Image: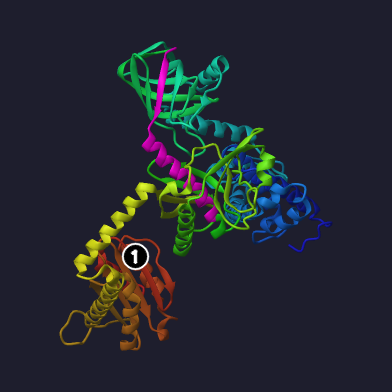
Amino acid sequence: TSSDPDGPGKTHHRVIADHLRSTSFLIADGVMPSNDGRGYVLRRIMRRAMRHAHLLGSQDPVMHRLVPALVQQMGAAYPELSQAQALIEETLFQEETRFKQTLDRGLKLLDDEVAGLGEGAALPGEAAFKLYDTYGFPLDLTQDALREKGLSVDTDGFDAAMAEQKAKARAAWSGSGEAADASIWFDIADQHGTTDFLGYDTETAEGQIITMLKGSETMDRAETGAEIQVVLNQSPFYAESGGQVGDTGEIRTETGAATVTDTKKVAGVFIHIATVNEGHIETGQGAQLNVDHTRRSAIRANHSATHLLHEALRRALGDHVAQRGSLNAADRLRFDFSHSKAMSEEELRQVEAEVNEFIRQNTRVETRIMTPDDARALGAQALFGEKYGDEVRVVSMGELAGSGKGNDGNTYSLELCGGTHVRQTGDIGAFVALGDSASSSGVRRFEALTGQAALDHMTQQSEQLVAIACEMKAPVSEVGSRVKALLDERKALANEVAQLRRELAMLGGASQGQGPAAKDINGVSFIAQVLAGVSGKDLPALIDEHKNRVESGAIMLIADTGGKVAVAAGVTNDLTDRVSAVDLVKAAVVELGGKGGGGRPDMAQGGGSDASKADAAIAAAEAQIT
């Protein structure tokens, strides 16, 4: 900003520096800007610093350009800053770009609100809440801005408006009431301990039923048809966490059986959501536990593919890529990652090819237990926002010479993960990218298929391609060129039809080639036409052709495009000081049921909705020629 850091703007510089440090460490710790929780605290810190940059005269995003200096000074002592530098810079840039729009709009609205307030007055809380709720302008920034003007905010009124909104939100929300209160699971954990997970090594095991619940009520016996939640001392069922869905399968005792439809976890207690489908089951019974092998295998494949995908994305797009969420289900995988723009087709194919390369490599997937510090020393990728205990599970897969990861520095993917995985990367089978889309601000969502689902998808695509080839009576290898030829032909025909329509319009539908008749209005030659079969985008070219034919005059064309009406007007240069095309269009648009309309004195356009008022629109335009 060229502002002297020791001059009048010293306070601004210090606020920016302090808040930059806080912001960078929060992002490095996995916190991302959002509208609630820690993310909202981060956003408020960021926006306060950005406002001070604005007060120094900064017109463009500046915070992200300060990160390298921070990393240079503090990166050696705090290596997590260096590791997350690209993500910090990207997040700051995106947030500051968006906030500038909010700030400009909010300050203007704030000025309007306080225009009539005297020195020492307070802005009504309802107005401050409107700025916050409708326009995203935080209360603390409103207070900062008003403090500089010698004004304040009625915070009690703001709090009351906030409370009223929350009350409305609570009234509009209705819970399902199906799950037990979370406190129950903490009580069970205190009384019986957490569930031992056996599922890394086996999909079948024996366990003992510790307790059963239906809703919030514990029960000793569940009969056929009962929908219950079962807690066991140990279980091979994976409980939903880390993006991996919970296992399904069967719990069988000597008196009955229950089908497990999902497995969840609260306070370390595994909750088997089940329906008794045979006999009855009782608390205290021993049980044979069987995970659905086919479904678990598909989930494992998707989860392992997600690890390969994460690394492939970082290599293709940059080190700023970090996991922001995932879904590893039986039928698909979904991976959310930090990135500001859509992936190109070339990038998608590059990532897909790299993942498949490491699947074909068919290396062993290995897991080791170690301390978080040891894991990071080996180059393991930790998930931002995750908190780890004294020991972590590290999953490695793939071989890439010189990667710098793993004991030998040649591991492709190395991540901290508590999920289940394939034994060899080849067990994933195949990987097909379905595409990426926007998940939220600064976050993209990559979707893909693996294994049999990927093969089924490719078969379906192949069958569709063969069907198209048969319709075109062409070999599959020529379908692309044939389709391109058809599209080119269609485009040429469309252009030819459009030209014929324009020529017909110029003739006014007559067969003598004279075109529409001109009408003299106060010495100005005025041509008006209502056209069918012509689009609104064709009107300017038709106007120009009319201008060339009449040499001097004003023209108005109205096109009925089916449900919508387009209108355009043109005035030759010798008459623009007397007649404005903008005035002609605005007068016509009102009659056509539209609003606005604009352009230049020699060419203007507008639209409406009522084609039946075309004659009235033309008459209104004629009235503008004086």
The magenta stretch is 284-313
Q: Quadrant of the C terminus?
A: bottom left
- Residue 3 visible in rendering: yes
Q: Measured from the top left, where is residue 301 in percent x and y?
A: 44, 44
Q: Residue at x 35, y 76 (%)?
A: 540
Check the image and report above or below for 293 versus 397.
Answer: above
Of residues 549 and 533, the one drawn nearer to the viewer in this rendering: 533
Residue occupying the far left of the picture: 511
Residue 297 falls within the magenta-colored stretch: yes
Residue on which the image places disc 1? 607
Q: Measured from the top left, where is residue 2 in percent x and y?
A: 76, 64
Q: Measured from the top left, where is residue 478 in percent x and y?
A: 28, 72
Q: Quadrant for residue 69, please give it.
A: bottom right
**How is the model colour-coded?**
rainbow
Residue at disc 1, secondary structure? strand
Q: Residue at x 58, y 45 (%)?
A: 415
Residue 272 is left or right of residue 58, and the answer is: left
Q: Main secondary structure of the magenta part?
A: helix
Residue 593 is left or right of residue 504, and the answer is: right
Q: Quadrant for residue 278, please give it.
A: top left
Of residues 61 and 120, the one drawn nearer to the viewer in this rendering: 61
Check the image and report above or below for 491 versus 43.
Answer: below
Of residues 170 and 523, the one drawn nearer to the viewer in this rendering: 170
Q: How busy is the neighbourhood of tag 1: few (under 14 within 10 Å), some, or many (20 plus)?
A: many
Check the image and report above or below for 610 versus 29.
Answer: below
Residue 422 falls within the magenta-colored stretch: no
Residue 556 is left or right of residue 38, and the answer is: left
**How many numbered tags mark residues here?**
1
Q: Measured from the top left, where is residue 617 in percent x and y?
A: 29, 68
Specify the amino acid type for callout 1.
Gly
Q: Quadrant of the N terminus?
A: bottom right
